[in-house]
Image (cartoon, rainbow, N blue to C red):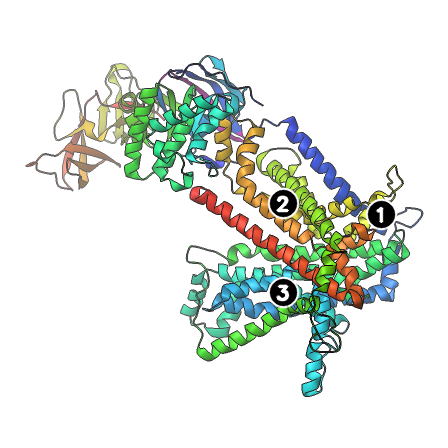
Amino acid sequence: MAAPIPHPAPRTRAAGVRVEGVNLSYGTNHVLKDVNLEIRPGEFFAFLGPSGCGKTTLLRLIAGFNQADTGSVIVGGEDISGLPPWKRDVGMVFQSYALWPHMTVRRNVAFGLEERKLPRQEIEARVERALDLVGLRHLAERRPSQLSGGQQQRVAVARTVAVEPKVLLLDEPLSNLDAKMRVQVRRELRDLQQRLGITTIFVTHDQEEANTICDRIAVMSDGVVQQVGTPMELYERPANLFVANFLGTANILEGRIQGQGPDRIFNIEDGIVLPIPPDAVVPADAKLVFRPQDAALDRVETGAVPLPGTIAHREFLGSSVRYGIQIGGTEIVVDTPFQSGNVLHEPGRPITVSVSPRSALWLAS
Amino acid sequence: MALALSRPVPRSHLSPGQLLVAGAIAAFLLLFLVVPVATVIYVAFTEKGTGAFTLVNFLDFARTDLFVRSFWNSVYVSGMSVVWASVFALPLAYLTTRFEFRGAALIQTLGFLPLIMPPFVGAVAMQLLFGRNGTVNLLLDDWFGVKVPFMDGLNGVIFVQSVHYFPFILINLSAALRNIDRSMEEAAQNLGSSGFRLFRRVVFPLALPGYLAGASLVFVKVFDDLATPLLLNVKDMLAPQAYLRVTSIGIADPMGYVIAVVLIVASILAMWASAAAMKGRDYATVQRGGGGLAKRRLKPWESALAYGIVGLILLLVLAPHIGLFLLSIATIWSFSPFPDAFTLAHYARVFGESSIYIKNTLIYATLAGLIDVVLGTAIAYLVLRTRLVGRHWLDWAATAALAIPGVVLGIGYLRTFYGVTLPGGTPLAALWIMVVLALAIRRLPYALRACYAALQQISVSLEEAAENLGATKTRTVRRVVVPLMTGGILAGFISSFSTAAVELSATLMLVQSNSDAPLAYGLYVFMQSPAGRGAGAALGIVAVLLVALSTFASHLVVERSQRAKGAAQ
């Protein structure tokens, strides 16, 4: 039987989380590869990546449901790697909510407090407080099956925050909600996190979700943390092709780097050549990456070299126009803002595309 | 996402408690299932006295006319029972699932009724109704001057067994028919097939796995049944021979064991056939929403014919119940179509001097049911929620009990535990607790399936959520797993309880004195003397009510727990 977890006064127990050198395999399947992360106290942090990238595995590892082959997890300065889930004091909201169908909302929320053997009155008070926090006090006597998806989600959150864990883990908490609820609930989650000041880790495959509510994001792919940064950093300065591609739309032009020093050029195809700015850091096998809105059509910005292309197709999006432009063998997209009175370019027409050196990214995979 | 990677959940915190529980279950199964059965097989293959390996016992079996005849009789009776059970089940299943049929649910329910009565109980009532001087033959003789030997010799066994066991075919076949995707039938119609050709070429082949599963079950049950032939005074079949050999010649005689081995092999063969048939289920019953055969409306004359057939079959399969009830309230019923007068004296006797049978049954069946659900829950948990090495062996061993006929288990217990004596000098095998253990082992596979299904329905994240909030494994089991399994556990208990309450084949071997005897045994004793028949019938009605009530209760429990859990699952 677990000793009751000691409970200091409520409120801000925000603890940092450090993941150090974690490796995890299922048989020959290497799911997490040398993962190192530092999550600051009180931060709203996201694990973002496509299906199978290892983000949920990493979250479950922090909760104690997966065991690392090597490495450790440190919460608030304490190494919890060896502790079973029930001794970790790391609250998790499950993707399926995992509300116990045989208990009412109130009993669900009281569960963790009862396991901590708190006095009756305190349990009651804290259950009320948790339910108030998510605005569901009036549904306390309902069964989970009598609640809507959004309400169930809020009960799951209330149940977890009621025990005031050191860290809050959210496993794709919005995936079972419809599109409209998702926007509302994500705002509520952010709001709640701010009020409680609790360190929160949020797992999602949706970059928009991560961008809108998280302080920082770890982008994961294939069991490797590709980059950690604020949403803006990741968008503006992606570390590699994967990150550039996963967050927003990116144009990628392949080519060969030729020459040395200030004379380096990027040879895209016969006759289509771009000088590489002398101060640019260009990894071997780099590709030229830029965002659709960072290119200009028929207008050469200072320091930019125009690339010859042909308009392949055009999509009118209202506030902007997206052009598909053929440059050599590659098709890129360019967004231009639209204002009433603008004249659109017609498909089939030759055009020049210029990317300012400021927005050009030289990235390898 | 990543669900595939995170399930099954790695559970590396293997507690000493789990090891202890697994060890205890293993010991129990070893002692009360594996060792007795192994003993039976061992004795069959060894020379009496020396203990050397030999096949001579099997040669003796093959050279003895009585045994060879018994073997073929058993095969014949089982096969014919399957045929007749199919004759009863096919029209009922087909008509109720394929056509818009008023009262289809009632028919399906009535079709179940025979199962809630031990077959040998019905045997006596059938004798009175269909025997040489039974109601039907007396009336036929009066009206047409003919008699039909429904109940003579092997015919009687076939008749009683097919009436009793046809629900197995009905249930499986109906389920299979219902699960056939409507589009399969529509595709055939679209290509020009209809009527009986459609049934023969598309519908029945798709339902065949279900039919075969039911048929093989009937075959095994009839092959292993001991009490029905004995009560009808048919001795040259295998199970009765095994029983008679052991009880009349003694537990040292090897022939009883040889027959037991033959029974086991036949069981395993039939089950293997059933499993092989079930393999086809996957492709036969692709169910996508629409599911189920399209129901057709019957023309008036078709409808009349259909109701006529259904009515006749139901009358036939409910005959044992009707006969038994009449017998239980009859003063004298002999050489007359119906009883002479009615009385409640038999019930008074059953609840008076013979109430010990009822009391024993309640105790034995309750204990057996409890053992089963405790073992079932524990095994299901170990298999589904831990990574304990060898956990699947527990599951396999417990399930293997399905293939062991009751009479074989009984013989095994006698042989294994008779030599073991208590301090007082009583052999272990003579204790009533042995009956309980044999019943528990026999019913364990069913309870285990129920517990298994209940646990499988519980999402692992419900347990993880509890652990995440500070509950240890033990606390999680107590506060989340067991409460959520309650419905399944109760259903498992009741199915164990109600079938154990009317089980006879193992009991017949193990009961040593009347005061330790359960209801089924009492029935058997009563039914053997003409004077006891009325009381026997009353006891039979008590048994039927007991089983019917518990079946109904289990139904309620399952319904209620499902409703309570609602859509959250």
First of labels 2, 1 by sequence position? 1
Q: Chain of mark 2?
A: B
Give A357 or A75, whichever is nearer the viewer: A75
Quadrant of the image for the N terminus of chain B?
A: top left
Q: CA distance from mark 3 to mark 2?
A: 25 Å
User: Helix, strand or loop at disc 2?
Assistant: helix
- Boundaries of the magenta span: A26-42
Q: CA distance from mark 3 to mark 1?
A: 34 Å
Q: Which residue appears at 48% of the width and 34% of the height?
A: B461
Most frequent secondary structure within the magenta stretch:
strand
Residue B283, given in percent of the width and then of the height, sits at 51, 56
Position of A8 with respect to B490 (left or right) is: left
Q: Chain of mark 3?
A: B
Q: Residue furthest left?
A: A341
User: Residue B150 appears in which quarter of the rendering?
Assistant: bottom right
Disc 2 residue type? Leu
Disc 3 residue type? Phe
10 Å crowding of disc 2: few (<14), some (14-19), many (20+) = many
Q: Residue furthest top?
A: A77
Same subunit, tags 3 and 1: yes
Which disc is residue B423 wearing? Answer: none
Residue A319, given in percent of the width and then of the height, sits at 15, 35
Q: Which residue is under mark 3?
A: B166
Which disc is residue B448 wearing? Answer: 2
Q: Which residue is under mark 1?
A: B415
Q: CA distance from mark 2 to mark 1?
A: 27 Å
Label 2–label 1 contact, CB within 8 A: no
In magenta stretch: residue A141: no
Same subunit, tags 2 and 1: yes
User: Residue A250 appears in which quarter of the rendering?
Assistant: top left
